[in-house]
Image (cartoon, rainbow, N blue to C red):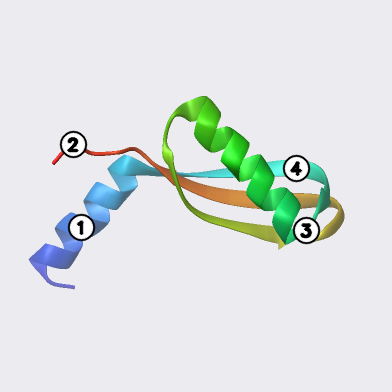
Amino acid sequence: MNAKQAILCCLLVIVCATITMKIPFCKSWLCKSECWLQKKLRKVGLQEYKCIKGGIKGKCRCVVCRDIPR
């Protein structure tokens, strides 16, 4: 890993966060709606969402990032 990649990696750690939540039933559309709600509540941008444990008593993972002024 060169210096440019290392700096980018550190910035992503500072700016982005992973949210994992338990939901009653995990399907892609339900995970998307839960992550969208987190996005609105935290006033951040949604980068990725995924069911990490599908079905009943599932888990949803959201990756949210703060907006950085340029």
Residue 23: x %, y % from top left:
78, 43
Say few, some or many: other residues with alpha carbon within 10 Å of mark 2 (under 14 / 14 to 19 / 20 or more).
few
Q: Answer with left or right where residue 1 lies relative to residue 48.
A: left
Q: Which of 7 and 38 is in front in this view?
A: 38
Q: Element type at marker 4?
A: strand
Q: Nearer the viewer, mark 2 or mark 1?
A: 2
Q: In which quarter of the image is the N terminus?
A: bottom left
Earlier-in-chain disc, 4 versus 2: 4
C-alpha gap between disc 4 and disc 3 = 12 Å
Say which residue label 2 marks.
69
The residue at the point 67 percent across, 45 percent down is 33
Residue tagged 4: 22
The residue type indicated by label 2 comes to Pro
User: Would residue 3 appear left or right of 51 to someone viewing this image?
Assistant: left
Tag nearer the camera, 4 or 3? 3
At mark 2, the secondary structure is loop
In the rendering, which numbered label is found on residue 8? 1
Q: Which of marks 4 and 2 is in front?
A: 2
